[in-house]
Amino acid sequence: MRIVFLGTGGTYPSKARNVTSIAIQLPGEVLMFDCGEGTQRQLMSSSVSFMKVSKIFISHLHADHFLGLPGLIQSMSLNGREDDLTVFGPTDTTRNVRMMLRLGYFKSGFRVVARDLAPGDLLDCGNYCIRCGKAEHTIPSLAYALEERSRAGKFELKKARRLGVPEGPLYRRLQEGRSVTVDGRIIKPNMVLGPARPGRKIVYTGDTRPSKGIAALAKHADVLIHDCTLDSTHLGLAEDFGHSTAAQAARTAKEAKVGALFLVHMSPRYEDTTILEKEAKAIFRNALIAEDLMEYTVKYRT
Ligand SMILES: [Zn+2]
Ligand SMILES: [Zn+2]
């Protein structure tokens, strides 16, 4: 599970940062969270194959979060994409995606499915699920939690030997959670496996003021990717426009006891983001300013 920060700036693109988009590489597919203008070019410069993007989750319908969709869809079509693409987002996403598909003289060669989501919705995607939370912005906005299913516990060789299970295919079967029969005795997986191991969890807030709901959504996440538009000297501005300061993002990370905090959506006014990083690190040590095309592999907690 690898996070690729495609665009980390807020509001409009700057020389240093494109607007918001984050890709998450999973086995066999890529999820994208937000797709600001110019995201497809960022994808070309990254390690992500844009044809493998299966689902795009839009946090809200401000231009810096969705305007990259029409161009990306057209390029996917020109490159011969055949697989469906699903675009999820808050209320009114479906209507907006339909409008985008009618822009200019273009007909997509593949199916684009759009679906409106609401806070509290849970999408079951097999090996992982997506939980929607309410972001506190100026328009309907969603925060998303990507939660991987828990994995089977560690295979305990000693126990298997003690129970007389012969090495080979039966080991694999037990690891896959299936019972086996040895000399007429039924050996169940829980007799040779340790406790289930938690899956990984990544939370992306989109644009938001600090919120108790988001702190709850992010509880014990491995990674929290949080709005960090301004520093604390602009607290009033952040509040008025539905954003967070670096300190507020860090407090949420601390409250939620996350593993790592990545700050995104920095205002283009910051050519140097040291002030933001310092402010966040003073509250939550494992805070980092995300940079365009930065990659981060999310490891299992033992
Ligand atoms: Zn924004
Ligand atoms: Zn916004």
Image (cartoon, rainbow, N blue to C red):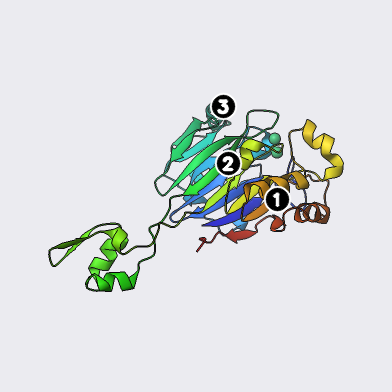
Alpha-carbon neighbours of circle 1 within 10 Å: few (<14), some, or many (≥20)?
Answer: many
Query: Percent x, y for residue 253?
Result: 67, 49
Q: Nearer the viewer, residue 47 or 242?
A: 242
Closest to the camera, between mark 3 and mark 2, is: 2
Q: Secondary structure at mark 3?
A: loop
Q: Which residue is mark 1?
A: 263
Alpha-carbon neighbours of circle 2 within 10 Å: few (<14), some, or many (≥20)?
Answer: many
Q: Which quarter of the frame holds ligand 1?
A: top right
- Using residue 111 as the reference point, say whether residue 253 is left or right of it: right
Specify the quadrant of the image occupied by residue 100: top right
Q: Nearer the viewer, residue 55 or 217?
A: 217
Q: Residue at x 83, y 46 (%)?
A: 269
Sequence-wise, the earlier of marks 1 and 2 is 2
Query: Percent x, y for residue 159?
Result: 30, 70
Q: Secondary structure at mark 2?
A: helix
* Mark 3 and mark 1: Cα distance apart in space: 26 Å
Marks 3 and 2 close (CB-CB < 8 Å): no
Query: Percent x, y for residue 109?
Result: 45, 39
Amino acid identity at mark 3: Thr
Q: Which residue is mark 2?
A: 217
Q: Which residue is mark 3?
A: 91
- Using residue 178 as the reference point, say whether residue 252 is left or right of it: right
* Mark 3 and mark 2: Cα distance apart in space: 20 Å
* Mark 1 and mark 2: Cα distance apart in space: 17 Å
Amino acid identity at mark 2: Leu
Query: Percent x, y for residue 57?
Result: 55, 40
57 shown above or below 193: above
